[in-house]
Amino acid sequence: MNRTPDQYRNVIFMNLHGELLPMPPFRNYSDPAKDPEAYPQWRVVAHPEKLRNPGGAVAVRYRVYAWLDDPSVADTIMEKGGVDVPITFRIRDVLLTPADVSVGAITGGLDQDGVAGQDDYIAVAPAPTVLVANKQYYTMTSYTDAGIKWTEFQFYNTPLKCPPRGATIATLKGLPNGTAVGGSATRTGGSTGASTSRARRRR
């Protein structure tokens, strides 16, 4: 049932002898967000790093990715017509401050540093909060709307591709076109991570 949940959609199990263990279909990845009209091949997903967290005050980590559903498309970063298109990530029921969170980014693979040639892959933590040489950065805003508390992040210049870089297997980073992620369409992409240092948040 876990491997092929569509085969068991709307099926009713009758456990008369106690030997069956009904299991609802679940996946450990989220369905992507998309805008088929404005950006038909772009895909974005956000998910917690762990499927569940123990009770109490623990750090909750989220991962945010962008990719192309069709890697042959020429787009490389999330911009259109020279205008940055940010990924918007909201956390409900909490007003966070910069001291409550840590945001990191994985940069590289593309040419975003202003120097000709493919950039090296590096982890940047904390990620910049202002634009520097077309690199990735983010903004953070906390507000209340209709009585509901929100903390909103916007991630800019997110790569849509993460091409391979490295001379040997030991130093190779990135993903070649044709690599499948999450069991769905062929895709490659970049990522950004947001780690919160407070635990009062829900998916």
Image (cartoon, rainbow, N blue to C red):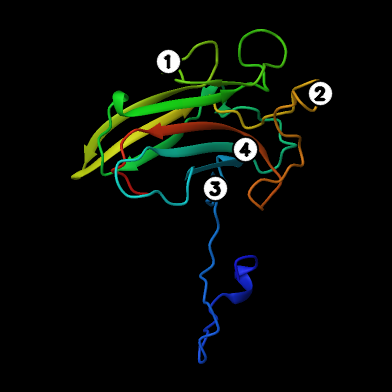
* Label 2 to label 4: alpha-carbon separation: 25 Å
Residue at disc 2, secondary structure:
loop
Give SS at disc 1. Answer: loop
* Percent position of residue 99, x then y: 30, 24
Q: CB atoms at circles 1 and 2 under 8 Å apart? A: no
Q: Which mark is residue 50?
A: none
Alpha carbon distance from label 4 to label 3: 10 Å
Q: Locate residue 59, reporting x and y percent.
A: 37, 37
Task: Say left or right for 176 vs 141.
Answer: right
Disc on res. 32: 3
| Location of mark 4 (residue) | 67
Amino acid type indicated by mark 4 = Trp
Q: Which residue is mark 2?
A: 168
Viewer-side label of 1, 2: 2
State the residue position of label 1: 130
Mark sitting earlier along the chain (1/2): 1
- State the image quarter where residue 110 is shown: top right
Determine whether, in the image, residue 184 is placed left or right of residue 39: right
137 or 101: which is nearer to us?
101
Secondary structure found at label 4:
strand
**Residue type beneath disc 3:** Pro
> What is the three-letter code of the residue carrying label 2?
Thr
